[in-house]
Image: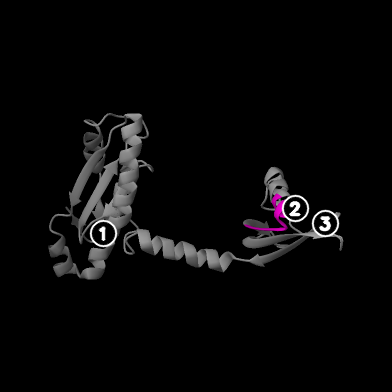
Amino acid sequence: MLTPGNGVGRNAFRKHLDTARREGWHEFEAWRVRKDGSRYWAHCTISSLHKADDTMLLGFSIITRDSTERRRVEDHLRRLATTDPLTGALNRRAFFEAAKIEETRCGTSGQSLALLMLDADHFKTINDEHGHETGDVVLQRIVSECRSVIHSSDLLARFGGEEFVILLTGSHGEIDDSQSPIRFVRKSRRFSLRSPTRRWR
């Protein structure tokens, strides 16, 4: 039985029932708890039950189906559509869409934006001397290091083979537009791309 506290708050649960009572049925998704304590996503259908003459509400029928796998596939497809599969950074399309939203937001709030273009020097040499698998690791590490010095509200995208773009949104209110690139450059000086036997600069 789907009850308040089992993935649905009391107020939300009441709203679901009210919708089913008013429209005859209602669908929604929420997480539920199995007997072993594990959680899963459930697709729930609530139907209102009435007397034959439809004069009295007798109760509700609730059917739940495990939708965890479907949601996992949907999330995976969504990530494929918006992120670079190698590094996990945003792809070009997702970056431009998110940047447009930030531009509109900042135009309204008066906050600033700063755009940084990054290019990994001598990356072809790394690929040629150490192989593309090593090059892939370096690109992943670059993204990891960039994320360590930017805010979660900033946007990081891979634009090309070894080209990256960062949009510092200013939504954190820490610095103005002239200081944003300086903050990033200062923090990025501690970047370290290491292997057990060699350090790339």
Residue linked to disc 2: 21
> Which residue is depicted at the point 30% across and 51% down?
95
Q: Look at the numbered disc 1 and give the secondary structure of its residue.
A: helix
> Which residue is depicted at the point 22% across and 37% down?
181
Residue 115 lies, with reference to residue 58, above or below; the image says above
The residue under label 2 is which amino acid type?
A: Arg
Q: Which residues are the magenta region? A: 19-28
* Residue contact at pointers 2 and 3, CB within 8 angstroms: no
Query: Is residue 27 one of those drawn in magenta?
Result: yes
Closest to the observer, 20 or 104: 20
Residue 59 marker: 3
Question: In which image quadrant can residue 101 be found?
Answer: top left
Q: Position of residue 1 (x, y in %)?
A: 77, 59
> CA separation, marks 2 and 3?
9 Å
Count residues near mark 2 (Cα–Cα under 10 Å), then give few for <14, some for 14-19, many for 20+: some
Residue 13 lies, with reference to residue 105, above or below; the image says below
